Image (tube, rainbow, N blue to C red):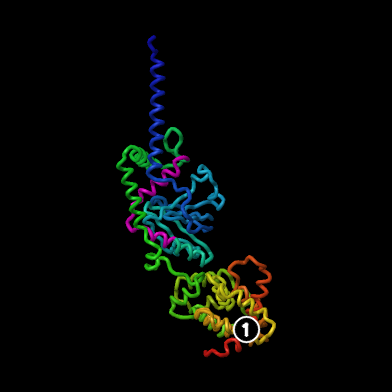
């Protein structure tokens, strides 16, 4: 029985829909082959900053500041409303997250762009411009350096096509409806044509797929090693958080210069200050000092910004607290604990002196100059109200600790305080046979 025109028309519509679906599925599979999904790139830095977008594709925008949760990972920055939005697993709830490609971007301080203090600007190759700001000096300095390092690590004349395809593949589920067209609310008209062109050609042209793979391999192979970045000064060796031996070796000394500078500053203007080493300085200012030291910038502790001596003492304590291995090495911890348990005072002094002599030169010399400095603090106890016991409580947990705190932490703390106090009280006898 011959079929009716309506049946022919229905069959034609059916096959057209099947072909369209096949093409759409095929394009998505090819994209997955070209760019493997990387849903969780390594996060280098994240936190809250003030953000204002002042240009979009070269078109100037009205400045509108807002607080954003900012995530720096690899070659891009993402702006979220808050940290909770970043943690959302559903891509549909994250499709409106603004992403900035640092490939070829430029970063600079922008004092003239805002009345706010500590503002810097990021300009992308696509003509987008962003201002980032924080009232906390050390925080914004840290962000500026982290983003600048990320930009410097990228090739000077990079091809950003691979990242565009990656962003396209990541967002395809949320931005492409089932009929294969782009949501007009999500994409500007001038972008739709190029978007569909990339989509169809990457899906149908095998040579394009191979070319993208080749570019990705070349990009990965060109990434500089950590050693190269350190040699070029892009990534600097840190002072805080390093091993004491590493710091001393780099400075060709047995006592870190920062320790010497802090001690000199305290002895110049802090020996008679009430609660010296016990009173805490402003943490933000201490962190700013820490940042400057880590960047190997010129440091003058007589500068007015460090006039609060508690900031200097706080930074010195932080240096010792953040050493990857304490001033009293892990391998000596139990031996010092056994020594402090001895009942006979003379035997205790001899054991301590013997242990101190066996310390590695950086530990020995730094320990000697530190405790000699603390004896000067004790000498002014009537003015600064800091006794040997008070200093032992402050410096005990800072200078020595067990490598594995599996035992009784409270008992360890008692011994830590006693060891520091005894070293201070018997300084002359423990270091008596040594020349200054």
From where the camera sits, is residue 39 visible? yes
Placement of 233 over or under 373, stated as above or below: above
Residue farthest top in this picture: 1
Magenta residues, as a range?
Answer: 147-173
Give coordinates of residue 243: x percent, y percent: 50, 72
Placement of 318 over or under 107, stated as above or below: below
Residue lying at 45% horizontally and 62% vertically, measured from the top left:
146
Dot 1: element: helix
Instruction: Say which quarter of the image contains residue 370.
Output: bottom right
Left or right? Give the position of 181 relative to 426. left
Quadrant (top left, top right, bottom left, bottom right) of the N terminus: top left
Left or right? Give the position of 289 relative to 410. left
Give coordinates of residue 153: x percent, y percent: 38, 60
Q: Closer to the camera, 325 or 82?
A: 325
Q: Is residue 55 magenta?
A: no
Instruction: Say which quarter of the image contains residue 233.
Output: bottom left
Give coordinates of residue 246: x percent, y percent: 46, 73
Query: Which secondary structure class fits the magenta region best?
Result: helix
Instruction: Name the residue beneath numbered marker 1.
Output: 424
Residue lying at 65% horizontally and 87% vertically, measured from the top left:
346
Q: Closer to the camera, 99 or 30?
A: 30
Q: Is residue 168 magenta?
A: yes
């Amino acid at each position: 029985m011959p079929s009716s025109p309506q049946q022919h028309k229905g069959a034609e519509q059916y096959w057209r829909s099947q072909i369209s679906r096949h093409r759409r599925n095929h394009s998505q599979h090819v994209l997955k082959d070209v760019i493997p999904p990387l849903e969780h790139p390594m996060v280098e830095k994240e936190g809250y900053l003030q953000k204002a977008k002042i240009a979009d594709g070269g078109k100037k925008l009205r400045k509108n500041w807002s607080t954003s949760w900012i995530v720096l990972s690899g070659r891009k920055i993402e702006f979220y409303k808050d940290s909770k939005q970043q943690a959302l697993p559903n891509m549909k709830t994250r499709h409106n997250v603004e992403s900035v490609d640092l490939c070829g971007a430029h970063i600079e301080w922008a004092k003239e762009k805002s009345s706010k203090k500590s503002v810097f600007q990021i300009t992308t190759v696509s003509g987008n411009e962003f201002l980032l700001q924080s009232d906390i000096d050390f925080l914004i300095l840290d962000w500026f350096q982290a983003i600048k390092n990320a930009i410097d690590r990228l090739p000077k004349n990079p091809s950003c096509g691979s990242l565009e395809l990656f962003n396209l593949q990541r967002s395809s589920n949320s931005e492409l409806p089932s009929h294969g067209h782009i949501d007009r609310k999500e994409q500007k008209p001038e972008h739709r044509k190029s978007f569909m062109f990339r989509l169809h050609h990457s899906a149908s042209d095998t040579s394009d797929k191979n070319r993208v793979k080749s570019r990705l391999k070349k990009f990965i192979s060109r990434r500089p090693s950590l050693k190269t970045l350190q040699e070029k000064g892009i990534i600097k060796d840190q002072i805080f958080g390093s091993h004491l031996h590493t710091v001393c070796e780099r400075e060709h000394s047995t006592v870190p210069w920062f320790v010497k500078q802090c001690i000199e500053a305290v002895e110049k203007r802090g020996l008679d200050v009430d609660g010296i080493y016990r009173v805490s300085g402003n943490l933000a200012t201490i962190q700013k000092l820490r940042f400057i030291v880590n960047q190997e910038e010129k440091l003058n502790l007589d500068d007015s910004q460090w006039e609060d001596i508690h900031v200097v003492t706080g930074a010195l304590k932080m240096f010792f607290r953040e050493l990857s291995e304490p001033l009293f090495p892990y391998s000596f911890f139990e031996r010092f604990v056994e020594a402090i348990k001895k009942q006979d005072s003379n035997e205790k002094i001899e054991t301590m002196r013997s242990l101190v002599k066996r310390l590695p030169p950086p530990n020995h010399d730094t320990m000697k100059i530190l405790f000699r400095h603390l004896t000067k603090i004790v000498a002014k106890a009537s003015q600064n109200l800091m006794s040997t016991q008070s200093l032992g409580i402050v410096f005990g947990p800072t200078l020595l600790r067990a490598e594995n705190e599996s035992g009784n932490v409270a008992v360890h703390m008692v011994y830590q305080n006693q060891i520091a106090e005894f070293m201070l009280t018997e300084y002359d006898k423990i270091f008596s046979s040594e020349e200054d």
